[in-house]
Image: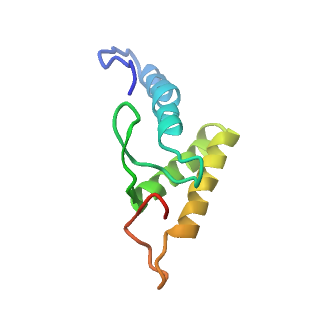
């Protein structure tokens, strides 16, 4: 997923917090933005390998919800980037459109087309 070295020595909590922030914002989030977000329906393709290749188009709702929370939290707690808000909205719209069965219950998993 990245060239991040895990053999990093930190001297303080502040350095560790900065390392986590940098790893999250420079590696983890961009990876998911680049490889997992479906530009057509806003859903998250959560079955991907370390290189970003989609292994399955099964879309588990708990992963959709987790991604919705994550991008919403990034927007509200880290920095109000419009791209993060747009991703969160896309996931929410996908869930509202496809996430429930005919009886109104949340489903466990969806396919590529909902």
Q: How is the image coloured?
A: rainbow
8 up-or-down from 38: above or below: above
Who is closer to the viewer here, 18 or 59? 59
73 sits to left or right of 23: right
* Residue in the picture at 58% in, 55% down: 41
Residue sticking out furthest to the left: 7
* Residue in the picture at 66% in, 48% down: 86
30 up-or-down from 8: above or below: below
On the image, which quarter does residue 20 sit in?
Answer: top left
Residue 32: x and y in percent read 48, 38
* Residue in the picture at 62% in, 43% down: 84
46 up-or-down from 114: above or below: above
* Residue in the picture at 39% in, 37% down: 53
Task: Let me know if residue 80 appears in the view.
Answer: no
71 up-or-down from 7: above or below: below
Task: Let me know if residue 10 appears in the view.
Answer: yes
On the image, which quarter does residue 89 sit in?
Answer: bottom right
Residue sticking out furthest to the bottom: 103
Residue 67: x and y in percent read 49, 50
Residue sticking out furthest to the front: 113
Where is the N terminus found, in terms of image quarters? Answer: top left
Residue 11: x and y in percent read 38, 14
């Amino acid at each position: 997923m990245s060239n991040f070295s895990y053999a990093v020595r930190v001297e303080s909590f502040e350095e560790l917090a900065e390392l986590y922030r940098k790893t999250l914002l420079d590696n983890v989030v961009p990876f998911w933005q680049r490889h997992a977000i479906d530009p057509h329906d806003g859903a998250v393709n959560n079955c991907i390998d370390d290189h970003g290749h989609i292994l399955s188009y099964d879309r588990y709702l708990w992963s959709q919800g987790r991604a919705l929370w994550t991008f919403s939290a990034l927007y509200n707690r880290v920095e109000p980037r419009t791209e993060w808000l747009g991703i969160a909205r896309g996931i929410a719209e996908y869930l509202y459109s496809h996430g429930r069965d005919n009886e109104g219950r949340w489903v466990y998993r969806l396919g590529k087309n909902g």
